[in-house]
Amino acid sequence: MPWEEAYVEFLRIRRVPLEERKCSDEAPDIIPQIRSAAKKDREVMEKGLRAFVSYIRYYKEHHSTFGAEVKHYSLSTEGFVPVEDIKVEEIKYKINLARNKERRNLQAKRAAKEQEQKQKKSKAASNATTTVMRKKTAKQRRASQSAEDADELAREYRLLKKLKKGAIDENEYAKLTGIEDLL
């Protein structure tokens, strides 16, 4: 195309190696196969639409506007989407069928997931009761006892500080520490 020749010259100035290639005449025409696949499968049609939009965006949003102006190109949907040959009602019908199928699959997956979660919860509850009934080792008992002792000692120390500051009297201190019987 004449407007592309300027871009080729631009690339030569930048020393980008280019070589002209001839198209092979032996290449099979796959457009009819793509069109029939898009008519049969909605996903293929949607991917074709996305590819076409991406194709247009490339030329529209190209960083180098030199030789990449969309107005010069005769862009067609050939090879992307079977635009003609499809009736709007047929598309809507197929789309509704696919959406209903997706909805049913999603509901089935959710139900299966909920069932799985209920089973896991029931197993976890039964496992929790068995782990509670298990005896602690001597090392675990000593560790928990020393942690309880440290907590109790810290609590009594805080109460003693309050007693010395006058925040509580001796009777309250005795009640809170549990030594009221000893006095």
Image (cartoon, rainbow, N blue to C red):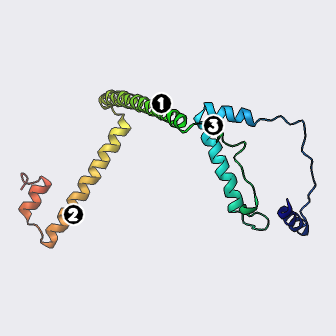
- Between 91 and 41, the one nearer to me in the picture: 91
In percent of width and height, residue 61 lies at 68, 63
User: Based on the displayed image, in which of its 4 quarters is residue 60 positioned?
Assistant: bottom right
If you read the primary sequence from the N terminus, does the residue marked by circle 2 or circle 3 appear first?
Answer: 3
56 displayed left or right of 132: right
Q: Name the residue at 15% across, 72% down.
A: 165
- Between 4 and 10, the one nearer to me in the picture: 4
What amino acid type is highlighted by mark number 1? Lys
Q: Nearer the viewer, mark 1 or mark 2?
A: 1
Picture quarter with the N terminus: bottom right
Q: Name the residue at 66% across, 32% down.
A: 37
If you read the primary sequence from the N terminus, does the residue marked by circle 1 or circle 2 appear first?
Answer: 1
- For the residues bearing labels 1 and 2, Cβ distance under 8 angstroms: no
**Residue under circle 3?**
44
What amino acid type is highlighted by mark number 3? Val
- Between 79 and 130, the one nearer to me in the picture: 79
In percent of width and height, residue 51 lies at 66, 47
In percent of width and height, residue 21 lies at 92, 49
**Residue under circle 2?**
158
- Between 27 and 180, the one nearer to me in the picture: 27
Above or below — where is 97 with respect to 80? above
Instruction: Using the numbered discs, state the Cα–Cα distance from disc 1 to disc 3 in whole angstroms.
Output: 17 Å
170 displayed left or right of 155: left
Q: Name the residue at 47% across, 30% down.
A: 101
Q: 10 Å neighbourhood of mark 1: few (<14), some, or many (≥20)?
A: few
78 displayed left or right of 183: right
User: Based on the displayed image, in which of its 4 quarters is residue 14 positioned?
Assistant: bottom right
Residue 101 numbered mark, or none:
1
Instruction: Using the numbered discs, state the Cα–Cα distance from disc 2 to disc 3 in whole angstroms.
Output: 73 Å
If you read the primary sequence from the N terminus, does the residue marked by circle 1 or circle 3 appear first?
Answer: 3
